[in-house]
Image (spheres, rainbow, N blue to C red):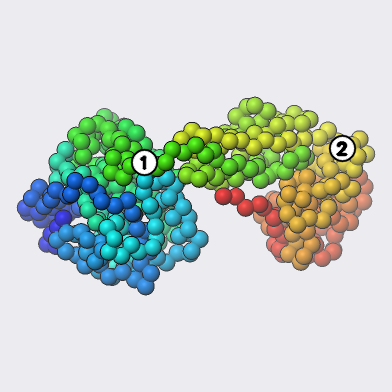
């Protein structure tokens, strides 16, 4: 499809259209503060594609060494020809870790379809291609444009089903995308799907949205096309029901109020093999049988062979919350009663397969001094009896990682000294006898560190300890060793 090079600006605002008489035009819209483009062809530019898409390969091109794209009358990614853009694009500039997260996100996005997501160039093999590199300015785009794609529709309901050997652009080197792998992924998924005649939708958790969202997005069934009326409109216009209300709009591809993305993509590529594999779930903090205090934090690793839909924490059978994106982390209520409590984390994948992990934690008896604790090797910490230095994994015990500690936290002073610790307030006397509350680098936060205090039972000294740990910690060299989460 051809984009005319002689374009004039015909309107301004959240939705901007650039066109030339008798030819197609580019519509610009906004999402999360960034600008994106769709090239809308003139009717005479639409060419019927073959009866089958002919490939299930989507090539994520990070332009290693740079990409030289030639703008021509039609798309052919096998020879770096694009109908909408031309120029030299710099290679993907973020870290290998960010690229890995982008690839994982895309693989999860397409896990339910018979699609291969790869960053290895297929060469002359038919494929679909997403340029994930460079900036819009490098191909002559308007300032701040973050992505652009050709759209196989000239008006509502007048569409070809897809564009063969297409190339779309996800300008990942723009400063907006810095350390935002999920946004890079969402743009990639939206731009390539536009070439299959999928329009914008209202749901912020869908890749086809231009409403703000910070998590992982997935294609959905029966999504309503349109706008939330607070940002840009759809390429073919929409009518709002009121200020800030939902727009009424028909999808460009089918002329209906909704589009079924799952059906559309499945018809093009087929579906993946039935997914009967449940997620893998592990509670990473606190450790099993850990001593906790009200408001403690629970962290979990939840992974799946395709994609995780959600993770839920239950405390004694009551839901604490549901998270849909990693890292999976919850803060428990501050009204915890004394005694044993059961934690259950339930992971669910996109196909409804579930798995869970269970462990027990203990909120000990209240105390004022160590002598108030009747359990073996317990000490009084922040008004609660917890495992002390004489207990396995107790406060002050040597450790290598969180799993070694009953508290679920292993402290490292940066000088090779690692002990099981618990949090404390450096301005209050809450640590057990023989421990000092040393600042851990963040304002108002500290840990109970083994060392001489001012004496007494259950007191805390934040200034009188002149030992090396206090000196190092005072300089911000204190780190809490946290288990890594997916």
* Residue at (28, 40) in percent of width and height: 267
Q: Which mark is residue 235?
A: none
* Quadrant, the N terminus: bottom left
SS state under label 2:
loop
SS state under label 1:
loop
Residue highlighted by disc 2: 368
Which circle, 1 or 2, is nearer the viewer? 1
Q: Residue furthest top?
A: 317
Q: Give the quadrant of residue 378.
A: top right
- Mark 1 or mark 2: which comes first in sequence? 1
Q: Is residue 332 visible?
A: no
Q: Which mark is residue 271?
A: 1
Can you say whether 1 is above or below 279 in the image?
below
* Residue at (22, 32) in percent of width and height: 256
Give the x, y percent position of residue 369.
89, 40
Q: CA distance from mark 1 to mark 2?
A: 62 Å
Label 1: how many Cα within 10 Å (few below 14, some 14–19, many 20+): some
Give the x, y percent position of residue 167.
26, 58
Is residue 244 or residue 483 the one in the foreground?
483
* Residue at (44, 47) in percent of width and height: 108
């Amino acid at each position: 499809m051809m984009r005319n090079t002689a374009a004039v600006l015909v309107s301004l605002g959240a939705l901007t259209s650039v066109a030339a008489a008798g030819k197609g035009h580019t519509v610009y819209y906004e999402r999360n503060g960034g600008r994106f483009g769709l090239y809308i062809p003139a009717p005479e530019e639409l060419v019927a594609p073959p009866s089958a898409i002919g490939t299930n390969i989507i090539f994520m091109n990070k332009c290693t060494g740079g990409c030289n794209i030639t703008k021509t009358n039609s798309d052919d990614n096998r020879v770096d020809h694009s109908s909408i853009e031309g120029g030299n694009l710099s290679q993907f500039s973020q870290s290998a870790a960010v690229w890995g997260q982008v690839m994982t996100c895309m693989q999860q996005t397409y896990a339910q379809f018979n699609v291969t997501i790869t960053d290895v160039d297929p060469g002359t093999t038919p494929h679909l291609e997403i340029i994930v590199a460079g900036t819009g300015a490098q191909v002559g785009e308007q300032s701040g444009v973050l992505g652009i794609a050709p759209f196989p529709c000239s008006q509502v309901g007048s569409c070809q089903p897809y564009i063969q050997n297409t190339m779309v652009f996800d300008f990942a080197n723009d400063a907006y995308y810095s350390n935002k792998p999920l946004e890079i992924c969402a743009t990639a998924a939206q731009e390539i799907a536009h070439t299959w005649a999928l329009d914008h939708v209202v749901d912020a958790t869908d890749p086809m949205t231009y409403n703000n969202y910070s998590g992982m997005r997935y294609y959905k069934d029966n999504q309503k096309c349109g706008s939330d009326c607070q940002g840009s409109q759809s390429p073919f216009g929409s009518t709002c029901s009121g200020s800030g209300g939902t727009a009424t709009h028909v999808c460009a591809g089918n002329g209906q109020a909704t589009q079924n993305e799952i059906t559309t993509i499945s018809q093009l590529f087929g579906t993946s093999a039935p997914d009967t594999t449940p997620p893998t779930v592990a509670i990473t903090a606190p450790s099993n049988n850990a001593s906790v205090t009200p408001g403690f934090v629970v962290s979990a690793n939840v992974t799946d062979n395709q994609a995780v839909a959600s993770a839920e924490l239950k405390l004694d059978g009551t839901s604490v919350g549901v998270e849909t994106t990693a890292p999976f982390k919850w803060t428990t209520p501050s009204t915890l009663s004394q005694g044993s409590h059961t934690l259950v984390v339930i992971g669910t994948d996109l196909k409804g397969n579930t798995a869970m992990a269970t462990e027990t934690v203990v909120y000990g008896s209240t105390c004022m001094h160590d002598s108030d604790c009747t359990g073996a090797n317990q000490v009084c910490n922040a008004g609660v009896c917890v495992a002390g230095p004489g207990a396995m994994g107790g406060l002050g015990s040597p450790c290598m990682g969180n799993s070694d500690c009953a508290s679920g936290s292993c402290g490292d002073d940066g000088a090779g000294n690692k002990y099981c610790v618990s949090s404390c307030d450096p301005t209050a006397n809450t640590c057990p006898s023989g421990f000092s509350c040393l600042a851990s680098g963040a304002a108002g936060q500290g840990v109970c560190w083994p060392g001489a205090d001012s004496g007494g039972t259950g007191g805390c000294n934040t200034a009188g300890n002149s030992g090396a740990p206090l000196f190092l910690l005072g300089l911000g060299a204190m780190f809490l060793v946290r288990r890594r989460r997916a």
